[in-house]
Amino acid sequence: MRRFIILGVALATSALGALPAQALPPTANEHAVERVCASPAAGEAACSALRLGRPTGGTTPAVPAGYGPADLRAAYNLPATFVGATRPTIAVVDAYDAPSAASDLAVYRKQFGLPALNAGGPTFTKVNQNGGTKMPMKNAGWAAEISLDLDMVSAICPTCNILLVEASSASFANLGAAVNYAASVNGVVAISNSYGGSDLGQMSAYNHPGIAITASTGDAGYGVSAPASFPSVIAVGGTSLRRAATASGWAETAWTGAGSGCSTLNTKPVWQTAATQCTGKANADVSAVADPYTGVAIYDSTPYNGASGWQVYGGTSASAPIVAAVFALAGNTGTGYSATNPYPASRLWGATGGLNDVTTGSNGTCPTSVWCNAGTGWDGPTGLGTPNGVSAF
């Protein structure tokens, strides 16, 4: 567990409608940032969720702290419903089972006035990695990750269908099987993967032209992880997001924990430009809020290390499902690609005017400055920037 000192940072949330939810800003005290998944073994991945703890002696709040759906959509200038006539499906791939995933998600959506699922509008479905109904074993850490992922795709696209695919374990073999299944389901336009492990060569399970497959770049600062390093995957970095006296009302800097760098095992996609100064696939492509100190509200009833209910989470586990949901909102996946550029990532690199360029902050030290320091244009921690509407997606 890593510990940080934070002074005078307030988190804020806005509920939709006349709901009573209010932010509970953390006090100017020591907070713990806790990883909820163990470090991965060889051939395995770890989830990238980070929980912001309450101060020593604090209690889990009865109402949500952290950014809510209205905050996130305002920060990224996003519509509240998808573009187009066909309701898209966002798939979330994680390991192990969260038995209360459906009921926890219902609590989150009701709190923030989002449409109820399976009530004639958007739907929620949970399956195992083969599409069956026999779920894998429960894991409290991954259950928290699942809540974070489901809440973030709900926050960004509350009118989208959601498919949760639970892999039997955190091995890349099983996670890849879950991704393959998700890609086979009619209507799936985006697949979110909030996990990572050591850099690997491209896996065919993550290669599905026309589907926006997102993956977290990691939470340990400068360094490359898979599957974000795969050329077919959209690598999602992280930022610190705060209210500010700007035209949009928000400001972002590179988050210190966001992963970044150049893969030595995967070739550079044709759409990534010379700006990366990488000979292989560069992480990240794009980014969104990931700093747990400017984190998001989630609801998870599975006790983990003494906490459950409303909590504040961050990590690139938050930014990956946010970006997947923006692709779903935009309604452009599956169309408009050439034989040489069949992947949604190529759209990002050709439409940077639809992104907020993040120009300050760093995630560590590195041999080439742009790989770990934010600046004008592409940089490693934040990629090309964060969403500003859906035009780049």
Image: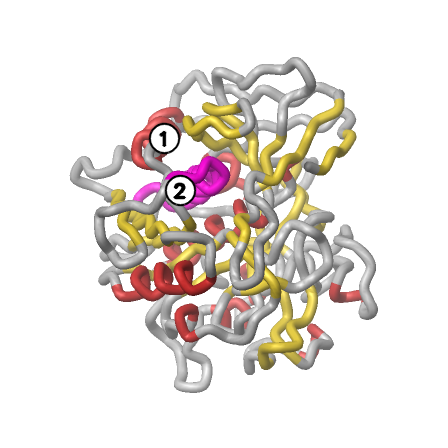
Name the secondary structure under disc 2: helix
> What count of labels does the image hold?
2
Residue 233 lies, with reference to residue 115, above or below; the image says below
In the image, the segment drawn in magenta is 138-159
Mark pair 1, 2: CA separation: 9 Å
Q: Residue at x 52, y 53 (%)?
A: 195
Name the secondary structure under disc 1: helix
Q: Is residue 26 left or right of residue 186?
A: right
Residue 47: % across, % down:
53, 48
Q: Residue at x 65, y 50 (%)?
A: 219
Q: Amino acid at mark 1?
A: Asp
Residue 354 in sight from this viewpoint: yes
Residue 280 lies, with reference to residue 362, above or below; the image says below
Read off the residue under disc 1.
104
Q: Nearer the viewer, residue 290 or 241?
A: 290
Q: Residue at x 37, y 38 (%)?
A: 98
Q: Is residue 156 magenta?
A: yes
